[in-house]
Image (spheres, grey):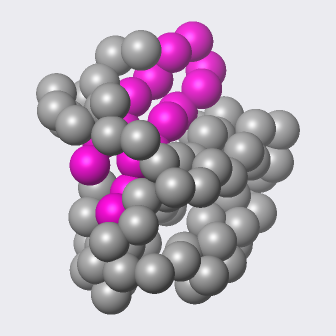
Amino acid sequence: MNNILGEKENTKPNRTVDVIGFYCPEPMFRTRLEMDKMDKGEVLEVLADDPSSESDITSWIKKTGQELLSISKKDNIIRFIIRKNK
């Protein structure tokens, strides 16, 4: 996978949300639901193939104060690694 941020891609996630095959707003909705269940400091992996997921999820991360550890792409799959900060 091509890691866009160039770092921290190997961080082991505590949970994974697979939203491949789902389209807006479902990937964002499921990501938010899973993050709500997690404790501060835990890491979430999100796998998506909806092209709008990249902008939706990265915007949500900034808005909510979470930490995007990495975002990578392979073929049509986008992989986000997110640390819960709040």
| Placement of 45 over or under 2, stated as above or below | below
Q: Quadrant of residue 42?
A: bottom left
Q: Quadrant of residue 86?
A: bottom left
- The answer to whether residue 43 is magenta is no
Front position in the image: 38 or 67: 38
- At 61% from the left and 20% from the top, the residue drawn is 76
Q: Quadrant of residue 40?
A: bottom left
> What is the chief secondary structure element of the magenta stretch?
strand
- At 57% from the left and 12% from the top, the residue drawn is 75
Q: How many marks?
A: 0
Query: Residue reaching furthest right?
Result: 21
Front position in the image: 10 or 63: 10
| Placement of 30 over or under 19, stated as above or below | below
Would you say residue 38 is visible in this rendering? yes
Residue 25, percent across and down? 71, 66
Residue 64, percent across and down? 34, 83
Would you say residue 55 is visible in this rendering? no
Residue 53, percent across and down? 56, 50
| Placement of 81 over or under 73, stated as above or below | below
| Placement of 64 over or under 19, stated as above or below | below
Q: Which residues are magenta?
A: 69-83
- At 42% from the left and 14% from the top, the residue drawn is 1
- Say left or right for 73 vs 64: right
Front position in the image: 77 or 17: 17
- At 26% from the left and 64% from the top, the residue drawn is 67
Residue 84, percent across and down? 37, 73
- The answer to whether residue 72 is magenta is yes
